[in-house]
Image: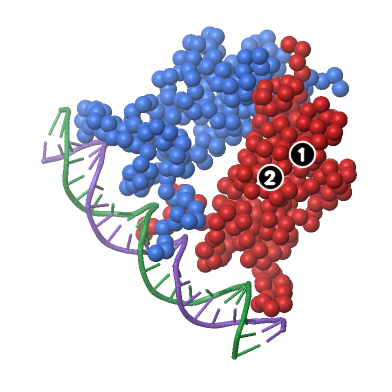
Chain colours: A blue, B red, C purple, D green
Amino acid sequence: MGVELWPSVDVVIFTVVDGALKVLLTRRSESSSAFPGQWSLPGGALKKYVDEVDTLEEAAALELKRKTGAEAPYLEQLETFGGRARDPRSWTVTVAYFALLPHDQIHLEAGKGTEDVMLWDVTSKGVKAKLAFDHKDILISAVNRLRSKLEYTAIAGYLLGKTFTLPQLKSVYESILGESIPEMSFRRAVSNSDALVKTNKKECVPGRRPTTLYRFKKGAKDVLFFPKSMVYGKGKGGR
Amino acid sequence: MGVELWPSVDVVIFTVVDGALKVLLTRRSESSSAFPGQWSLPGGALKKYVDEVDTLEEAAALELKRKTGAEAPYLEQLETFGGRARDPRSWTVTVAYFALLPHDQIHLEAGKGTEDVMLWDVTSKGVKAKLAFDHKDILISAVNRLRSKLEYTAIAGYLLGKTFTLPQLKSVYESILGESIPEMSFRRAVSNSDALVKTNKKECVPGRRPTTLYRFKKGAKDVLFFPKSMVYGKGKGGR
DNA sequence: CTAATAGTGTCTATAAGACAATATACT
DNA sequence: AGTATATTGTCTTATAGACACTATTAG
């Protein structure tokens, strides 16, 4: 029974670049005793953080800050993965978090060397690279959680900058959900949600009609967004 | 840095007795070094289980079996709670699970002494007893998860026996959700879900019309149940 | 003018809830 | 018959999506 079982904390950091969903991955050193040189989710033993932080979420935020140089506008606990098989060396436990932030807030140089930290394209099947440990499972779980939350909240807003156009927002939803949303339904949902405010600026691109820029009201990103996800009591029928 | 941080596993075990939601709690021994004699969620250090099990979920299932004598028909990871404040002795981490099972499968005698294991009434605010550690937070988180899952799945079925009447099922939904469901809407949802099968038996109570007994189809409890929780693509409008 | 995208108006099928009606037991 | 609950029928209204339309820029 001489085993030591320290949990670790891993963070799945998502962002969107030109409409495409990306994850931040780090490369393990060549001298690691497990999965040397392979790509993995950023994270580390809770032991490293335990003197500096009071909660698990703070530990995740600290890890995120070290890898991106940014505060996390959105950070949520995902799931805890534990078992005998995930690390060949011993029974391990890792608490996974997932984070959303705008691309322009990520400064990869904050990490070690630039070649060791990279943004990868993600689909619902994961990334192209082979990942260390069970990080593929964790990543897929995070993508699924992101998708399901998009269906009823406005958290896509955390992936965009302060202001954005409706076509941009719609395209984030569409590319992550993998299906197109009817124009009128989308705009009605936005309008009914009362979560966005028109700015008086426009985004102008040659050859196109200028597009109105919007921003989120405070706190509105966590709020119900799409109307179909309603439950008994707030329905549409009746009189 | 001589700290040892072994995670523990706690299980929130729900059942329904006469339409009322209950949780299973255990009393800590009077000689405990923290929270002696207080009520708490069943659980224990992962260390205890790590030689016997290969995954976290197996550890939770084992804990549940020891306290109830039953296999868990439904067991799901809830959330992981960790921090410096939750146990006065040290920084701790616990992975919480939540389980649903029919009342008649619980055999409290399986635990130590009957006075040490009990079913308590639960509301969305928790239980009457003061709980050890942050178990009140864990319990409330579990109730919220249960409620939100009831809104779009049929997991209430795990709380009832093999067969049940529609009024019984409806009453489970209503007592946990805390609101009444329109009769016609409920029956339509059940009918559309295609999750239930009529048996040819009836439940008979003197003075009332006999009630048809139903049972769930295999796997149907985890399936979409109430139609309002639909998303783009499966809507009601259009032509 | 055309091309391209942004943004709006309107019509329709569908489904949720209200409410009334009917069914089937027991006393 | 009367009571109590189970179960079904029908009508009304809100709304998601289809689709056609208008608006605003550049060339």
Task: Look at the numbered discs 1 and 2 and tell me whether their residues touch, using CB distance below 8 Å.
Answer: yes
Whichever of labels 1 and 2 marks the residue nearer the N terminus, that label is: 1
Q: Amino acid at mark 1?
A: Trp
Regarding residue A86, the answer to whether it shows in the image is: no
Q: CA distance from mark 1 to mark 2?
A: 10 Å
Give the letter of the chain under mark 2.
B
> In percent of the image, x 88 and y 44: which residue is there?
B113
Circle 1 — which element?
A: strand
Give the labeled residue for mark 1: B39
Q: Is D27 situated left or right of B208 in this image? A: left
> In percent of the image, x 84 and y 43: which residue is there?
B116
Depth check: give the residue in front, A173 or B38.
B38
Against A165, residue C20 (above or below) is below
Against A132, residue B43 (above or below) is below
Q: Amino acid at mark 2?
A: Val
- Give residue A169's quadrant in the image: top left
Mark 1 closeness class: few <14, some 14–19, many ≥20 residues within 10 Å: many
Give the letter of the chain under mark 1.
B
Give the labeled residue for mark 2: B127
Against B181, residue B120 (above or below) is above
> In percent of the image, x 37 and y 33: which residue is there?
A216
Using the rendered image, report if marks 1 and 2 lie on a common chain.
Answer: yes
